[in-house]
């Protein structure tokens, strides 16, 4: 059974945490650097220019999150890579907006729907299969004692996960007609900062006030109080979506303002399909029930459980569910599957 490496990170300062991260994950961070160097080179970009562009984000991040810039400095030191290279890995979403067709399906299930006082969040992360050689599970402890568990590409702050304050995030790619070049906070840094928040209200405020030049979707869940909100954010604002019947799902299209979607004609079915499947278990839902839903292949090749389509075009030839994660707040654990959940097994990781 394939498992992603588990990297525990502690330190009394952000820099010390970064050094430990870089040292423990050095092999995988180098793989991530080499992967994106190859991707950008094949696209015709100069690696030198890509590094310079990513490095320019450092000052932008420093103005809002100086502690995370120190962590980047530590990751570079521990891994032996340059800070610019670490910034490329963390800013790859902004630099290229690589995903050009749907990727990722997220969901939240509140006690009203799960029963027995349980709250869950879940996500299938669909992306290029090439990243599977450098994915990691991070377990981070920050200075104030907050613990964070989640998935990431090696060298990144984090992508999706949950913390000991009862918060989880699941994110989706969005592309709006307002997306532009320029300098905003890279989403990877924002994700990490959200997972350092102590409560739901602070996390929601942080999402709304953070400057941005591109779009992204964040499904935020409060496992302590049984709340969830989905925020579709773009350079000109943000739209909030509430749960219905205790269930909230999202994929890769704007629901509240579909007219600003930059990719026309994209399938808009995975969020509705996941909600339909989850509703079938409403009232008494377990992690096993959610796993069954996340293994669904309806609408292949752009199904909830993704697999490459040899006859597809563009990204669909390589699109695969690189990981599947279910957060069980009651048990304070995450069930994580490496690769498509229909083929692998979920392993439980405790916070």
Image: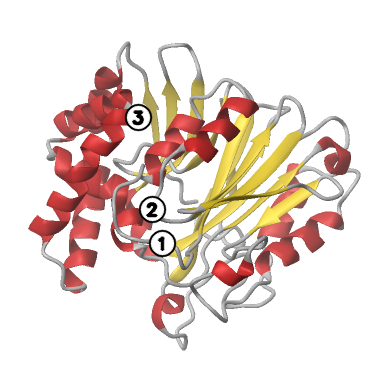
Q: Earlier in the sequence, mark 1 or mark 3?
A: 3
Q: Where is mark 3, residue-wise? A: 64
Alpha-carbon neighbours of circle 3 within 10 Å: few (<14), some, or many (≥20)? some
Residue 174 lies, with reference to residue 210, above or below; the image says below
> Hey, which residue is sitting farthest right in the picture?
283
| Picture residue at 46% right of the left edge, 11% below the top | 144
Residues 339 and 39: in front is 39
Check disc 2 and report its element: helix, strand or loop. loop
Residues 136 and 316: in front is 316
Residue 262 seen anywhere in this rendered image of the structure: yes
Residue 179: give its label: 1
Provide residue 211's location: percent of width, then percent of height.
Answer: 41, 42
Instruction: Name which quarter of the figure residue 97 lies in.
Output: bottom left
Provide residue 206's location: percent of width, then percent of height.
Answer: 51, 33
Q: CA distance from mark 1 to mark 3?
A: 21 Å
Badges 2 and 1: C-beta atoms under 8 Å apart?
yes
Q: Where is mark 2, residue-wise? A: 213
Quick check: 70 left or right of 101? left
């Amino acid at each position: 059974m394939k498992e992603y490496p588990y990297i525990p990170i502690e330190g009394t300062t952000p820099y010390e945490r970064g050094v430990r991260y870089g040292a423990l994950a050095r092999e995988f961070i180098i793989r991530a650097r080499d992967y994106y160097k190859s991707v950008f080179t094949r696209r015709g970009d100069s690696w030198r220019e890509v590094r310079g562009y990513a490095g320019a984000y450092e000052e932008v991040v420093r103005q809002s999150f100086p502690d995370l810039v120190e962590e980047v400095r530590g990751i570079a030191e521990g891994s032996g890579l340059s800070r610019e290279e670490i910034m490329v890995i963390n800013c790859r979403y902004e630099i290229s907006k690589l995903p050009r067709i749907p990727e990722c399906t997220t969901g939240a299930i509140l006690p009203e729907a799960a029963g027995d006082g349980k709250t869950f969040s879940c996500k299938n992360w669909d992306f290029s299969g090439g990243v599977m050689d450098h994915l990691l599970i991070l377990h981070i402890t920050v200075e104030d004692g907050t613990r964070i568990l989640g998935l990431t590409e090696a060298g990144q702050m984090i992508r999706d996960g949950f913390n000991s304050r009862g918060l989880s995030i699941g994110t989706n790619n969005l592309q709006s007609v307002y997306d532009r070049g320029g300098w905003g906070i890279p989403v990877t840094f924002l994700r990490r900062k959200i997972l350092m928040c102590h409560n739901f209200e602070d996390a929601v405020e942080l999402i709304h006030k953070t400057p941005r030049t591109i779009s992204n979707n964040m499904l935020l869940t409060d496992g302590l109080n049984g709340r969830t909100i989905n925020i579709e954010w773009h350079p000109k604002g943000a739209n909030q979506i509430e749960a219905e019947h205790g269930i909230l799902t999202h994929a890769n299209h704007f629901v509240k303002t579909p007219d600003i979607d930059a990719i026309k004609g994209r399938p808009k079915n995975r969020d509705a399909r996941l909600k339909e499947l989850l509703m079938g278990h409403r009232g008494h839902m377990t992690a096993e029930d959610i796993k069954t839903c996340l293994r669904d292949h309806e609408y292949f090749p752009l199904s909830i459980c993704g697999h490459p389509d040899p006859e597809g075009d563009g990204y669909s030839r390589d699109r695969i569910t690189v990981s599947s994660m279910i957060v069980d707040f009651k048990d304070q654990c995450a069930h994580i599957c490496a690769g498509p959940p229909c083929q692998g097994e979920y392993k439980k990781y405790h916070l």
